[in-house]
Image: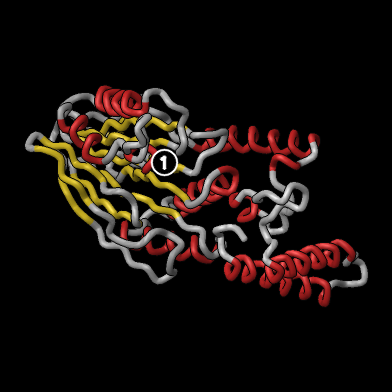
C-alpha cells in the first residue's frame, strides 16, 4: 500500500459506503439508483484491495498509483503512465484550467496600503501549486490589511484544490458585516474549525496570517508555519509558530504575536520551497542564508529585497528545475505614508 496509510484510506472509503447506502435507501422512485450502486461496487472493490494489500498498486503495470491522485479519488486504480491517451489529455486540460483559475486568485504582485508596501514572488513547481498567498485590502482607509501565506499538504491537483478552498474560506471569514470583524485569534480558530470540518482527515495546511494597521502596528499568528523574519536595523528576529497546522484538531487555539515596524523595517514570509531548495551537492538553502541576505538589505525597497533573496536562492540551486513550490512575501513599512490601494 502507499505511504498514505491503510487505516486512513479505509476510513474514507467506509464513509463513502455509508453515504451511498443512505442515498440508495432514501431515493425516490423517480431517482435512478444504478449510478449509486455502481459507485458502491467500486468502493467495495477498493476496500477489498486494502484487505489484500494491493490498494494503490496499478492494475496494469503493478507500479505505484500517485499518492496525490489517491487522496483526490481513492477509487483510482491506474497510474498516470498507464492512463489511456484520451484520459491523459483530459487530465492535462483539467490541470491547465486549474492553473488558470489558481493564478486568477492570486493578489497583485505589488500592493500599497497606507504606509505599507508589499511585494511577493510565486513560483509553482508544476502547472498547479499548493502554496497559498493573499492580501486583503480593507475598504476603509482606517481598516486593517490582512496578509496570508501558507502551504497545503500534498502536491499537484489535490493540493491546488485545498489552496483554492483556503482562499475562499479566508475571503469569506474576513469580509463580515461592518463592525463584526473577527479578531486575529478568532479568525484563525474559526478557519481551522471550518477547514477540519470540510476536508478529509490527513489534509492540513501550515499558514501565517496577520494584519497591518496604519501606524506600523502588526499582529501575527502562525499555524505551524516556518518562522516569520522581522528585518530591522539591529538584525533579523524570527517569530515561530503560535499553533498547530490548520486541519489537525478542530479545537486548536492560536496565540497572537504583536509588534511594531519602524519605517524601513520589513517582515518576510516564505514557504519551504525557498529554504529547502537544494544545490548539486544536496545541501539545502536554509533559513539562515535567507535571513543573511534579507538582513543585509534593511531599508531596501521590498522589490529590491525580494529580488535579492530570490536571486540568491536561484544561485544556490544552480538554476535546477524546481522540486517544490516557492513563494516569498516581503511586507515593508515605507519611510512615509500615504494611501494608495494598488501600485
Front in this rendered view, residue 205 or 105: 205
Q: Residue at x 31, y 32 (%)?
A: 118
**Left or right of residue 284: residue 36:** right
Mark 1 secondary-structure assignment: strand
**Left or right of residue 76: residue 118:** left
Farthest residue, direction right:
29
Farthest residue, direction left:
234
Quarter-of-image position of residue 287: top left
- Quadrant where the C terminus sits is top left
Q: Is residue 318 above or below residue 234?
A: above
- Quadrant where the N terminus sits is bottom right
Quarter-of-image position of residue 2: bottom right
Q: Residue at x 67, y 71 (%)?
A: 15
Residue identifier under label 1: 134
> Residue 98: where, in percent of width, then height?
61, 38
- Circle 1: is it few (<14), some (14-19), or many (20+) Cα within 10 Å? many
Q: Residue at x 47, y 57 (%)?
A: 204
**Left or right of residue 207: residue 172:** right
Q: Residue at x 16, y 35 (%)?
A: 265
Amino acid at each position: 500500500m502507499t505511504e498514505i496509510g491503510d487505516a486512513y484510506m479505509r476510513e474514507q472509503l467506509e464513509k463513502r459506503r455509508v453515504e451511498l447506502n443512505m442515498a440508495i435507501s432514501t431515493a425516490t422512485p423517480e431517482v435512478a439508483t444504478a449510478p449509486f450502486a455502481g459507485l458502491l461496487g467500486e468502493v467495495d472493490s477498493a476496500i477489498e484491495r486494502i484487505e489484500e494489500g494491493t490498494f494503490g498498486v496499478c492494475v496494469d503495470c503493478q507500479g505505484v498509483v500517485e499518492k496525490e491522485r489517491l487522496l483526490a479519488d481513492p477509487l483510482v486504480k491506474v497510474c498516470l503512465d498507464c492512463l489511456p491517451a484520451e484520459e491523459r489529455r483530459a487530465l492535462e486540460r483539467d490541470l491547465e484550467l486549474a492553473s488558470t483559475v489558481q493564478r486568477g486568485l492570486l493578489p497583485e504582485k505589488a500592493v500599497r496600503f497606507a504606509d505599507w508596501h508589499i511585494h511577493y514572488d510565486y513560483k509553482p513547481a508544476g502547472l498547479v501549486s499548493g502554496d497559498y498567498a493573499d492580501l486583503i485590502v480593507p475598504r476603509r482607509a482606517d481598516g486593517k490589511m490582512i496578509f496570508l501565506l501558507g502551504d497545503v499538504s500534498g502536491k499537484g491537483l489535490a493540493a491546488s484544490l485545498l489552496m483554492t478552498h483556503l482562499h475562499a474560506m479566508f475571503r469569506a471569514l474576513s469580509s463580515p458585516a461592518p463592525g463584526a470583524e473577527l479578531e486575529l485569534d478568532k479568525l484563525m480558530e474559526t478557519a481551522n474549525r471550518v477547514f477540519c470540518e470540510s476536508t478529509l482527515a490527513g489534509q492540513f495546511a501550515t499558514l501565517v496570517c496577520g494584519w497591518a494597521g496604519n501606524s506600523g502596528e502588526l499582529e501575527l499568528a502562525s499555524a505551524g508555519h516556518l518562522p516569520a523574519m522581522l528585518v530591522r536595523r539591529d538584525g533579523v528576529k524570527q517569530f515561530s509558530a503560535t499553533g498547530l497546522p490548520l486541519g489537525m484538531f478542530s479545537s486548536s487555539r492560536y496565540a497572537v504575536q504583536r509588534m511594531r515596524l519602524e519605517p524601513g523595517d520589513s517582515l518576510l514570509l516564505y514557504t519551504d520551497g525557498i529554504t529547502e531548495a537544494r544545490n548539486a551537492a544536496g545541501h539545502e538553502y536554509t533559513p539562515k542564508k535567507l535571513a543573511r541576505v534579507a538582513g543585509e538589505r534593511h531599508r531596501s525597497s521590498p522589490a529590491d529585497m525580494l529580488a535579492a533573496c530570490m536571486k540568491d536562492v536561484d544561485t544556490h540551486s544552480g538554476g535546477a528545475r524546481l522540486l517544490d513550490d516557492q513563494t516569498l512575501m516581503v511586507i515593508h513599512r515605507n519611510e512615509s505614508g500615504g494611501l494608495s490601494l494598488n501600485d
